[in-house]
Amino acid sequence: MKYQSPALWTPEDIEFTGIPDFLEQTPEDITEFRSVEASRRNQIRLSETLGEKTGWGSKWLDEIQSEPTGVLWRKAFISAAKIIESNGILILHGNRGPGKTRMAAELAVYQKNSRYRTAKRLFMEIFATYAPESTNTELAIMDELGRADLLIIDEIQERKNSGAEDQILVHLIDARYASNRPTILIGNMTKPELSKSLGPSIVSRLHENGAAIDCDWPSFRTQSST
């Protein structure tokens, strides 16, 4: 049986309603209706959570169709989900390849809408608004990312750690913290490197309502190539 995220609808979840009584309602009709309706709802959910407007690449729509593997990954996912449910700050860190972004994508499907950015992309978008010919504004970008049900900022190790970037990141995380919206930060870094890179303000928020998960199990990419 093909894997499907538990966040998505199954035919069994669909109540058989809205069909006029005078139409024939055979078991086959009901089964088909439920299947079609589940598919329709899932297309909407995936569009809202991982679709093009969210910033997620199309790769991740395919990625979540494959079942996650590894006991340690699944255990970490359960812990991560609890943090997101409590509207906390989640940091996924460690070496490349253990499925950190895959985990964030799976978590995103549970939300009404998400926004995904790499750190480099986030700051490029912000700084592009400073150009005289720009029709976008820093405020508009910050408001969009601040209102998302879940915000994921990936590859935070690519930050330049400049004063301007630090201010933007702290402001965005503080805004989401104040409005009880969860945030995921992902980086190929050790815990000490994270603390130094993110600074005391974000680390303080993390200690108050959040956690850092060290994804230290073997790389899925290495496993798949052997």
Image: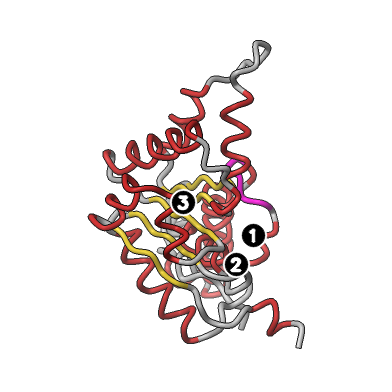
Asked if residue 54 is among those painted magenta in the image, a careful observer would answer: yes
Mark 1: give few (<14), some (14-19) or many (20+) Cα within 10 Å: some
* Residue at image point 59% right, 82% down: 218
Which residue type does callout 3 highlight? Ser
Q: Secondary structure at mark 1?
A: helix
Three-letter code for the amino acid on which mark 2 is drawn: Ile
Query: Which region of the structure is painted magenta?
Result: 53-57
Say which element carries label 2: loop
Residue positioned most to the top: 132
Q: Amino acid at mark 1?
A: Leu
Q: Nearer the viewer, residue 46 or 115?
A: 115
**Which residue is the site of mark 3?**
197
On residue 64, the disc is: 2
Upstream in the sequence, badge 3 or badge 2? 2
Q: Nearer the viewer, residue 67 or 8?
A: 67
Q: Are marks 3 and 2 in contact (CB under 8 Å)?
A: no
Is residue 8 something that shows in the picture?
A: no
Q: Secondary structure at mark 3?
A: helix
Q: Quadrant of the N terminus?
A: bottom right
Q: Earlier in the sequence, mark 1 or mark 3?
A: 1
Residue at the disc numbered 1: 61
x and y, in percent, of residue 197 in the image: 46, 51
